Amino acid sequence: MRTQDTIAADICKRFEYAASQRGTLEAHLEQIAQRFWPDYVGVFQSRGMNRAPGSIRTDEMVDATGARALTRFGAFMESMLTPRNSLWHGLIPSDKTLMRNRLTRLWFEDARDILFRYRYAPKANFQSQKHQDYLGLGSFGTACLFTDKLVGKYEKGLRYRSIHLGEIYFLENHQGIIDTAMRKFDLTARQAVQKFGPENCSAKILQANGIPTKQDEKFWFIHCVRPRDEEDGYDPGRLDVRGMQYGSYYCDVDQKTIVKEEGYYTFPYSISRYVIAPGEVYGRSPAMMALPSQKTLNEQKKTVLKQGHRIVDPVLLAHDDGVLDTFSLKNGAVNYGGVTADGKPLVHVLPTGNLALAKEMMEMEIATINDFFLVSLFEILIEKPQMTATEVLERAREKGALLSPTMGRQQSESLGPQIERELDVLQQLKLLPPMPPMLRDAKGQYSITYDSPLSRMAKAESAAGTMRTVQWAGEIFSLTQDPSVFDAFDFDTIVPELGEANAMPFRHFASDEKVQAKRDARQKQMETKNLIDAAPALASMVGKTGAPTPA
């Protein structure tokens, strides 16, 4: 079995290898940061150490179109995948036969509601961190969200942190799934002692912490999370960290020692890529595709600014130096000698070129940038308030077809692992309700169903097809007056599925018993009405034939 010193040495070597493989990419990312997200200037090449807090970082950003498009991209992604005021995913049993059990379905709804309550709790910090994730995805092509327990004396729950690409490195397994993450970060001496305890810190850290003027001296650490194997002492039957599937190691970079060992049952880092180029592990982003246009736009704006200055404060041309000796540009000034005796001007403005053409060229580059960040797509697909229900479904179907290829990847790489991690943490904290017997017998196996606006757009195709078919049937009925045309439809199936496509909660549907009771009451009411309607006719028949003769 590996010793901790062996594990620490192995982690440091793997980190150095991963960092060496990313040198070219980090130079690329630095250019992206300079022009699209200046907050991260200097992070990739010097870990931000050469930038004083509060310093200006927009030196290379002459035009802000790219930064504005990135902000909109982040808002679009959030509104499509994880909208704040929506239950954007659900939970169902993996065994489809359990879907017919009402207690099981209600348990999954309760579990989902609990998860959303803790996810959006103020101290969880999910919304702001997830938004950072989307901005990282649009700019750098890779996003990473760390999900863990809320560390509090009196509170339990979830806690999120967006890890920027400048400090996270990761590796894939043979199936292309990210299963190893290495995060390099710094702590002051005082913070290190607080986090790891004085008994686990090096003498150098303890010495710095003991001197008030050196307590804020920084030291580097690596947090490595990787699958635990037998060499690491993995034993699924154990109840301590050695029984957890993933090992968590905090390594002191300077001393190459493990200062803290923990474990996770599920991978705590949710890492997603926008798109992946062949042979690459890290993602590529809209900003990378828009970088040439942003560079061109910056140069165009410099030229337009110069041209604008010449128009507003023009360069003057004169035939004789003497004319300009006493020339004044003040309001109301009279300049003698500026024209000839017959009125021809002796001073002219230097031609400045066609400003309208320059503006047109800039608008072309702006449109290209907006296309890469999906801004143009969302502007085209804005819904009109006058649309009918069928038109809304058709527009949603169109949106889903256009957006699914670019956003669907986030559900499998980011949101799926994140939800699994969240449920694992809530289960460990005993914040989920007890499972019903049928689900417990099935070992709690579950699947994730996405109910975000993007997912509903994908489902809108079948819903739109259903609505079109029912409308056509209605038109046939209006022509033939034959109600049998509706016999082909199973509305007991259609209505719940339409409700699901429109994000209607399952609990808002009546139970089978209530549905049957309503139908029985309606049938009884119809029978009573038929008797009442038939009463006058029966009375008339009795009047004609006379009362029956008693026996």
Image (tube, grey):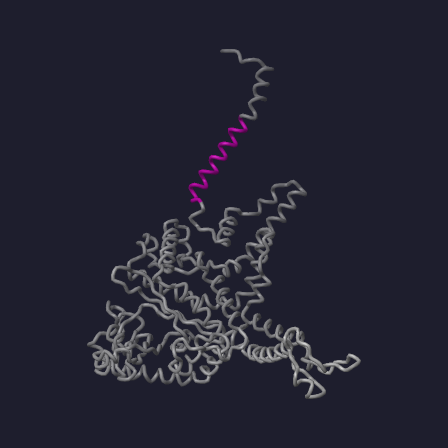
- Viewer-proximal residue among 466 and 394: 394
- Viewer-proximal residue among 489 and 78: 78
Residue 535 falls in which quadrant of the image?
A: top right
User: Which residues, given as a range, are shown in magenta?
Assistant: 510-531
Left or right of 534 on screen, residue 105: left
Q: Position of residue 276 (x, y in %)?
A: 49, 76
Quarter of the image with the N terminus is bottom left
Q: Position of residue 507 (x, y in %)?
A: 42, 48
Left or right of 111 on screen, residue 209: left
- Numbered disc total: 0
Q: Is residue 530 above or below residue 316?
A: above
> Is there any visible trace of residue 3 in the rendered image?
no
Residue 193 falls in which quadrant of the image?
A: bottom left
Taking the spot 36% from the left edge, 56% from the top edge, the residue there is: 114
In magenta segment, residue 515: yes
Q: Is residue 13 above or below residue 273?
A: below
